[in-house]
Image: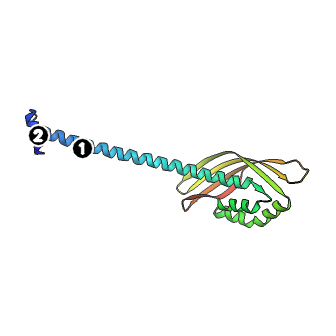
Amino acid sequence: MAGVAARAVRLGIPPRAAGIATATLSVLLALLAGAALWLGAQARDARARAADREAALDAARAHAAGLVSLHHETVEADVRRILATSTGEARKEYESGLDRLRARTVTGKVVQTGVLRAAGLVSLSGGTAKALVVADVDIRREGSKEPPRDELYRWSMELTKVGGTWLVSKAVQVP
């Protein structure tokens, strides 16, 4: 500080004014640094929220893709994919109907191919989210002379974040 005061006197600036200017600049620099830190934290939070929204939506899409893609020759892998993307009520519901699903798919030689048409996030709060998903499904029976059946599926899906991963906890078909 003595060096600053000596230079101020050489330039004709009173030492008191130099001290006030130095203090003012120090406060301004501290405010600017604080603002930069705050803005950086806000940007990081916004990126994290956007990533969380996208992860929840990706989970809903993956679950729907599993529901609309079944093949009698790969039914075990198809079922594992559905279970891997579900939790809670949805998982219990799928587990309770697995034997029936396997039997119908294998016995009927079902080939179900789906295409996701749209998906959107309705809400996201903490560790829960709600999404809407729409898919077209082509259902046919291998070796059958019946024409394939086209279906449109729409789901309202509730998702829960479990161990950092979004999983579907409830999937309801909507009209």
- 112 relative to 167 in the view: left or right: right
- In x, y percent, where is residue 88? 64, 64
Q: Identity of the amino acid at label 2?
A: Arg
The picture places residue 173, in percent across and down from the top left corner, at 72, 53
Residue 175 visible? The answer is no
**Distance between the alpha carbons at the discs numbered 2 and 1:** 17 Å
**Dots 2, 1 in contact, CB < 8 A:** no
**Relative height, residue 24 to residue 157 (above, below):** above
Residue in the image at 54% along x and 57% along y: 127
Q: Is residue 62 visible?
A: yes
Element type at marker 1?
A: helix
Q: Position of residue 86 (x, y in %)?
A: 65, 60
Number of residues whose C-alpha sits closer than 10 Å to that of mark 1, classed few (under 14), some (14–19) or many (20 or more): few
Residue 16, numbered circle: 2
Amino acid type at circle 1 is Val
In the rendered structure, find residue 27 and report the number of the disc placed on it.
Answer: 1
Identified at 39% across, 44% down, the residue is 39
